[in-house]
Image: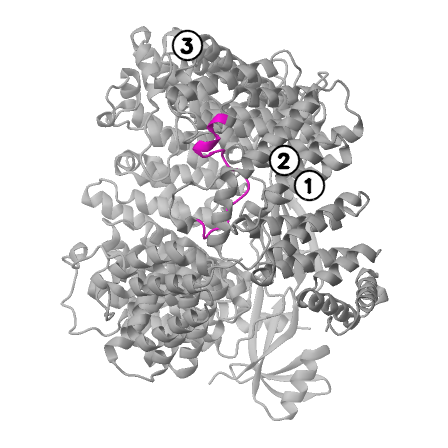
Amino acid sequence: MADLDTDFTSGDAGASLTFPMQCSGLRKNGFVVLKGRPCKIVEMSTSKTGKHGHAKVHLVGIDIFTGKKNEDICPSTHNMDVPNIKRLDYQLVGITDGYLSLLKDNGDLREDLKLPEGDLGKEIESKFESGDEFLVSVLAAMGEECPIAIKPMSS
Amino acid sequence: MMAAVGAPEVISQLESAAKVLMAPPSMVSTEQRQHAEHIFLSFRKSKSPFAVCKHILETSKVDYVLFQAATAIMEAVVREWILLEKNSIESLRTFLLTYVLQRPNLQKYVREQILLAVAVIVKRGSLDKSIDCKSIFHEVSQLISSGNPTVQTLACSILTALLSEFSSSTKTSNIGLSMEFHGSCKRIFQEDDLRQIFMLTMEVLQEFSRRENLNAQMSCVFQRYLALANQVLSWNFLPPNLGRHYIAMFEATQNVMLKPTESWRETLLDHRVMDLFFTVHRKIREDSDMAQDSLQCLAQLASMHGPIFPDESAQVTYLAHLVEGLLNMINGIEIEDSEAVGISNIISNLISTFPRSVLTALPNELFASFINCLTLLTCSFGRSAALEEVLDKDDMVYMEAYDKLLESWLTLVQEDEHFPRGCFVQPAVQVFNSYIQCHLAAPDGTRNLTANGVASHEEEEINELQEDDRELFSDQLASIGMLGRIAADHCIPLLTGLLEDRVTRLHGQLQRHQQHLMASADPGTVDRKVLDDLYEDIHWLILVSGYLLADDPQGETPLIPSEVMEYSIKHSTEVDINTTLQLLGSPGEKATSIPGCNRTDSVIRLLSAVLRTSEVESRATRASLTELLSPQMGKDIVWFLRRWAKTYLLVDEKLYGQISIPLSTAFGADTEGAQWIVGYLLEKVINNLSVWSSEPELANDTVELLVTLVEKRERANIVVQCENWWNLAKQFASRSPPLHMLSSTVQRTLMKALVLGGFAHMDSDTKQQYWAEVLHPLQQRFLNLINQENFAQICQEEAVKQEIVATLEALCGIAEATQIDNVASLFSFLMDFLSSCIGLMEVYRNSPETVNLIIEVFVEVAHKQICYLGETKSMKLYEVCLTLLQVYSKNNLGRKRLDVAAEEDQYQDLLLIMELLTNLLSKEFIDFSDTDEVFRGQEQSSGAGRAVSAADVVLYGVNIVLPLMSQDLLKFPSLCNQYYKLITFICEIFPEKIPQLPEELFKSLMCSLELGMTSMSSEISQLCLEALSPLAEQCAKTQEKDTPLFIATRHFLKLVFDMLVLQKHNTEMTVAAGEALYTLVCLHQAEYSELVETLLSNQRDAVIYQRLADAFNSLTASSTPPTMDRKQKVAFLKSLEEFVANVGGLLCVK
């Protein structure tokens, strides 16, 4: 897990984990906190009870880290939390004891992220072992961080 | 194969194959099934299977085998017709008929198939004079007179089979003969045999209608003959001497209006025919299935027109008899549910078929009774339709019937100058009243009341996809609005009174709630029933008022309806203008509390009733009662105000012959009234946008009202004088609450409105200041943000992204506001952004929705502006678009999409790129700029020669798009349409670039064209055909043979040739296909001759051969040798039309 202190030193001081937004202002493919988890909105629809009722928003989101589906329905006037999402690309320079060694832009090394389980982890391992040079995309939100994709080095 | 084995072996083989086919799927394998199917197929193809088939029919007990034997006979007779002895055909037919007659217990599908074979033999023989097939009618009439229901049913089946075969419709069997044959058969049949069938049918109906009691079996026979009569009356008559090419199309069999040929005059103008159907209906009307047929027969009779009537007086006599019969039928009965639609069809058919002059020539009394009956029927169906809604029935028969009748009213009153003056006023009052009554709550109305007066009130969940009532019921509302205008004297004051009353009650109700809330502070305890009833009443009253007072024509300036104008003028002498203005200007007061309120203009008073509703709503929001309000009512109010403003605000006297003084005084140009109301509407808009940001549809309707206020220069001039407008602009520019909470579409439209407003009349200082308020902050914020040192680090933060997205949305809105007189300044403003946007493509390459939005900005700019841009400006736009494409392409390399089960919106970027390319190309078609005139004064001297051309950009784009477009993607309609639009444009505009494409791209382009031509919708097929001519012309120009393009066009020649000559094609496509064919023929004359030769050599019939050869000769006669000359091309197209008419039906086979 990311250490909050390092966050502060890396220039994000004061950036909150989430910010509020009126429910009606959310949109598909955007992000929202559902059941306490940061989610990407995959479905969003409105409805009302009776012809003269007020709009309600039905949200379906996918947890950006676990892929789990969450749903919620709330009046469109309500404020929802929107997570601050960051996505950073690091070059992979090593794998030690199941931890990734990642090169930051400023040349520093970070070694606090685990090699993910599943297919992505296997792909990272095999590509690294065959000597490929590539970037690992890391997603960060609400104090959690996780590698989510690999990309070829842009020349 | 069959010849080799004896009949018993064949039977046992077929029977075991039938067993396999009939077995449940789990019992047999696919191979077994295919094998069994193959056995039947080859059996049906065997040579002269007649003896075997007869044997099968006589001995086999397996129904399916019997069915196949009948099919085999039918196919073989057609196949071997010319080889067969005429009398053996005759005896075969007799055998089949006797066979069926002797076996009353045959399975229905077997019997029908055998009769079908009989019908096909009769039809095939009907053009062969040597065979006498007429005897069949004699036989059938004997069967009918037998009195035996089973035999009579059989007779009916025979006639039905004949009818289907000869109708030359989709029901007709495929017998491998030319369309011309089918058409000739049909024409001969309809003149004689069809009428004979009709007469036989009438006799049966007559006979049955005389009987006192019908048992179940007889009534069943009755029903079949009634259906047969309906089939005859729905016959799509071929006109006796119209061009042959009509034959080349199979006709529809539904919704055919009855247009018999002259030879039917004696039969159908005989009153006894019509009388019989009325009698029949009276007899069977309680049987809902049969009643549908008998009413449909009458509806067909009510649609009768054409040469059957010798003159107008015959039409009048016929119609009078029809109307009398109808009135006799309806009066004094209680209409069954199952009769409603049928009766409304009769009325709607007769009103739309018979000319006004015939309607007005009816005896006065009869016409009056008819209108009276129509009125009562309409009101009654309306009430029943309302009941259906309460009961939430699946099958809304009364609603359908009511819609039909209201539509008929519209037809009638739209041409009311033909009728006696005022004859529709009373009916209009009644229909209008009943509509209002059905839509109001008790006690004034009957909404949600069941038949026994019990109120039902259910709250259902309504999703966003459900249409608003104003769209869902737009046809009904348009009719009711029109009737309201006809009876304006009654209807306008009625609406006003009801609305004022509801608004007063709503006001009171909200006040009570407020007191209650202050006491208990729990909004959950509020009973919304009373409020919801009021909202629903107001909802309908506003919708009807909107449709009554104004039309909503797309595009053109709507006029005040003449009836409304006349009504206002008629009463203007009794009206006190000052009181009227006072009433208008005080929406916060009760209308009736204003002294002299009864001497005000009623049209203005109806508007002010809506303004009063609006005022109650606004005050409630200020009192924090928003939660109690109805967003639906909010939508209704702004919808009405928008519709009203388009028509009445700043009414232009020049457009009217006469004008009402109250209307011109209150809303004319340079009046205080107009200024006041603009201010009021603006305030309403601003209030709504801050209160209702959470209701997307309401916010959208609101911002559309704002656009209406500024899109016309005259209105905008007043708007920009309002302080509120400036406040709105500042508030939006500061991107702070509440406006930034609006949905992105609303924000985009708001930006558009603000830009449109900026082109109103202002002095130059003010104007400068305005842009400084509206546009500059946008630029400033954007530049500040992207130029921040740490932008690279913060750019992915949600708040930053939102700021970027808001800017991009605003840019789209600005582009949308482009008009010819503002394009100069808007283009320069937007250009500054476009290069920065390309930078953002890099930054947000991982965020598809942002990338899409960036491309969308380019799409909008190209869409709205390129047609006005001169050469230099266009080039700038091309350059920046090229850069965009390069970045897009680079970022797309190696990008993987989830192809499996991909959704259309995954490919939004591809669609947008194609749209962008198409928009850039559209300049070649629509170009309003002959010079950079609109940019005069700010143009630097342009560089010599074009740096980047449209062709460069578009071809570069095509290099990106083509490899990405797969066949799977073409299954998405939007992608498919956009793709073909694009490639057709390219072929038309830059044919010289096509041969230069890399080989792979060239191939896939050609494949796309072929695919589009042969297996897509007719629209796309047409696009592809249009692309062929320029390609062929290109080949002709370069005169190089054996280039890939030259070879490809040769292939297309064959495709187009087959399409035009051999296949049933959409006649709309003849022109596009003809043009393509001609240029291709010019290019490949030898190959064309070869195609013709091959086709001719396949003809065995000497007569047909000659006709075809002649037709081909005259097709190219006027253009020999064919050259790419416009005149010759036109001549060819003309000959082609004749060619298709002449031999098209000969080559197209069914």
- Secondary structure, mark 1, is helix
What are the residue bounds of the magenta stretch? B247-266
Q: Which chain contains the residue that carries disc 2? A: B
User: Which residue is labeled 1 in the image?
Assistant: B157
User: Which residue is labeled 2 in the image?
Assistant: B228
Who's the residue at 23% across and 74% down the image? B947
The kind of residue on which mark 3 rests is Ile
**Residue B926 disc label:** none
For the C terminus of chain B, which image quadrant? bottom right
The kind of residue on which mark 2 rests is Leu
Q: Nearer the viewer, mark 3 or mark 2?
A: 2
Apparent side of residue B1132 relative to residue A79 in the rendered image (left or right): left
Q: Mark 1 and mark 3 in contact (Cβ < 8 Å)?
A: no
Q: Nearer the viewer, mark 1 or mark 2?
A: 1
Which callout, 3 or 2, points at the residue further toward the start of the chain? Answer: 2
SS assignment for the magenta stretch, majority? loop
Q: Nearer the viewer, mark 3 or mark 1?
A: 1
Who's the residue at 59% across and 47% down the image? B165
**Residue B529 in the image: x percent, y percent?**
66, 24
Which callout, 3 or 1, points at the residue further toward the start of the chain? Answer: 1
Q: Is residue B15 above or below residue B376?
A: below
**Residue B724 in the image: x percent, y percent?**
36, 36
- Cα distance in 3D space between marks 3 and 1: 76 Å
Q: Quadrant of residue B233?
A: top right
Apparent side of residue A99 relative to residue B83 in the rendered image (left or right): right
The kind of residue on which mark 1 rests is Ser
Which callout, 1 or 2, points at the residue further toward the start of the chain? Answer: 1
